[in-house]
Amino acid sequence: MSRQTKISAVSPLELLSRLLFAVVSTITLVILMGGLSGCGESNSKKAATFSSMDVTGAPWGQTFSLPDLDGKTVTNQSFPGKVTAIFFGFLYCPDACPTHLTKMQDLKKRLGPDADKLQVVFITVDPERDKPEPLKKFLASFDPSFVGLRGSREQTDAISKDFRVYAKKVETSASKKDPMAYTIDHTTFTYVYDPTGALRLVVPHDLAMDQLEADVRTLLKQAQ
């Protein structure tokens, strides 16, 4: 199902802030990736090459545990045999989140018979506004298999810190009248776990679809 997205206007100052945030996030990931070789990964993992950032053996993001939208605990071991793609976002996101979910929707179509071996997980960074039922409907409008996770503020802050995720509330002109009318600047990377539940890749938001599909197929092949 296609979905139209309204792009919000931003001030030059806010645009500069977003650009700086993107640069800092990328630099942080590059630094974190340093020294990952020789971390005990198998020969098959060492031999694989990816278009995404290979973070195999990274000391962060190795596990996660959050309640889904029905209150059931979901962890990185909840989807054995599947590649799990995690994205941090929020229901009222005007652009990056719908774009990401559309990309995941298209990726599942490309995988054909292997579509069920990809599990998309959406973690809200805005649990105060993102209530379970509206978030369920939002995700289902892209694909009914997409899973939403919503923790408490404390849980959300903890997992964001562990994954080095940036998420900052930004006031808008509308929020002067309505305190809940804020937006959020946030990390737009996708974090990918292999079928064994190990964190393997960090995917930039602008990675070409052909490259992303190839990376996912490589992870699935390694699990055979």
Image: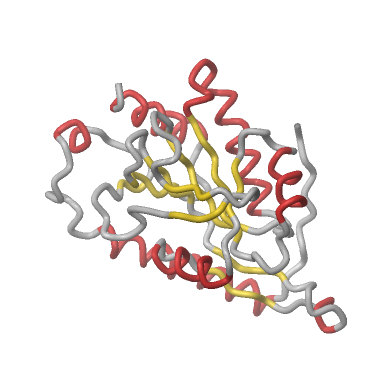
The image position of residue 190, as x and y in percent, is 48, 49
For the point 75% across and 32% down, the residue is 1
Q: Position of residue 164 (x, y in %)?
A: 41, 65
The quadrant holding residue 24 is bottom left
**Which residue occupies 32% across, 23% down?**
221
Instruction: Say which quarter of the image contains residue 51.
Output: top left
The residue at the point 55 percent across, 54 percent down is 67
User: In terms of depth relative to the viewer, which is nearer, 12 or 151?
Assistant: 151
Point out the residue furthest to the top here: 113
Q: How many marks?
A: 0
- Please name whichever residue, 202 or 131, is drawn nearer the observer in this view of the structure: 131
**In this view of the protein, which residue sits in the foreground, 197 or 110?**
197
Q: Residue at x 33, y 53 (%)?
A: 62
Could you say which quadrant of the image residue 194 lies in? top left
Q: Residue 87, how many percent across, how many down? A: 53, 51
| Residue furthest right as drawn | 177
